[in-house]
Amino acid sequence: MAEWLYEEGIGEARAALIEKGRLVEALVEREGDAVRPGAVAQGRLVATIIPKKRGIVRLISGEEVLLEPIPPRLAEGANVLVEIVREAIAEEGRPKRAKGRMPQAGVKPHAGPSLLQRIRATGVPVVPCPAHEEDRLEAHGWSELMEEAMTGEVGTEAAALRLYLTPAMLLIDIDGSLPPAQLGPKGAKLAAQAVRRMGLTGSIGIDLPTMNNKDERIIAAAQIDKYLPLPFERTAVNGFGFVQIIRKRERANLMELLREDPVATAALALLRRAERHGTGGAVTVSGAPAVIDLLHKRPDWMEQLAKRRGGAVTLRADAALSLAGGHAA
């Protein structure tokens, strides 16, 4: 039986879909004012990029949204409602604005669904995971998955993935000690599982080993179809072992989200450990100087931690610690 594990953390919410005892999908939603997919927001057309086709709308919040297409007779400076179909994504070297379209007639402004609302809408049971109970996310490999997303490295010596974020597409390179006839299907399975687990979307290229014949390539492609749920589109595996997958892109994937601000990612992970440390009460939180400096700048986070633990929180910078090496005592 499948279930969602849900945790309302400090600074972010986390959810993990568990099927047959395995973590198959992870979702993280950071706090902030950025507009979410599914929202309808009010703004003003401030620029036209391509006449009658594409323009920029500045929302009341100040965020800019790419509007496509521009409705007829809508002039620059006019007020407009925009339905958000893709959130802003901080791609390396080329940040993408949120993308929007005109909503249906009669629709009023409203917020997009939260992470909790999205997982409830799937119909799969949702199990809350408060900090004073067993850490069920960690029991299913949460920290290991976060490390995979940060490093882009998945698998073992026999079959390993290397994931690369590029402006054009996400590339997955497959290598290992297995013979090509075995590495092809094994690598395709690992790639499909990683795509689902990390919420990888958009254009995804998978570089499988060069296999001996078409039958072996068909067997490898079948693993993608087996382990990656629809909807998606893919090409056949070509003679060089390359296959491309297209998945609808509405949000940043887990790799993009965690890598956008590594210090914030480390700080939020440290807060999670600190909240769950021991049985509550006062706590000393030690971390890399950059992480502790950020926590000093977020008194709201520290107040939440103190309230949830029921005791004072002391911050201690330790230059010997890596970004991910913080701890609570």
Image (cartoon, helix red, strand yellow):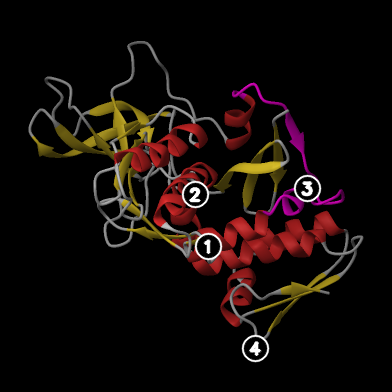
First in sequence: mark 4 vs mark 1: 1
Q: Assess whether residue 132 is covered by the magenta stretch.
A: yes
Sequence order check, earlier mark of 3 and 4? 3
Find residue 250 and report its horizontal and vertical position in percent: 40, 37
First reached walking from the N terminus: tag 3 or tag 2: 3
Question: Residue at horizontal 43%, vertical 45%?
Answer: 200
Question: Do we see residue 36 in this rendering?
Answer: no
In percent of the image, x 19 and y 27: which residue is there?
69
Quarter holding the C terminus is bottom right
Q: Which mark is residue 136?
A: 3
Which contiguous range is marked in magenta? 121-141
Looking at the image, do the residues carrying marks 2 and 1 touch, with CB atoms under 8 Å apart?
A: yes
Residue at x-position 71% and y-position 39%: 5
Q: Earlier in the sequence, mark 1 or mark 3?
A: 3
Three-letter amino acid code at the position of disc 1? Ala
Q: Are marks 3 and 4 in contact (CB under 8 Å)?
A: no
Secondary structure state at the residue bearing disc 2: helix
Question: Between tags 2 and 4, which lies in front?
Answer: 2
Mark number for residue 320? 4
Which quarter of the image is occupied by the N terminus? top right
Check residue 158 in the rendering and tell me which mark sits there, or answer none.
1
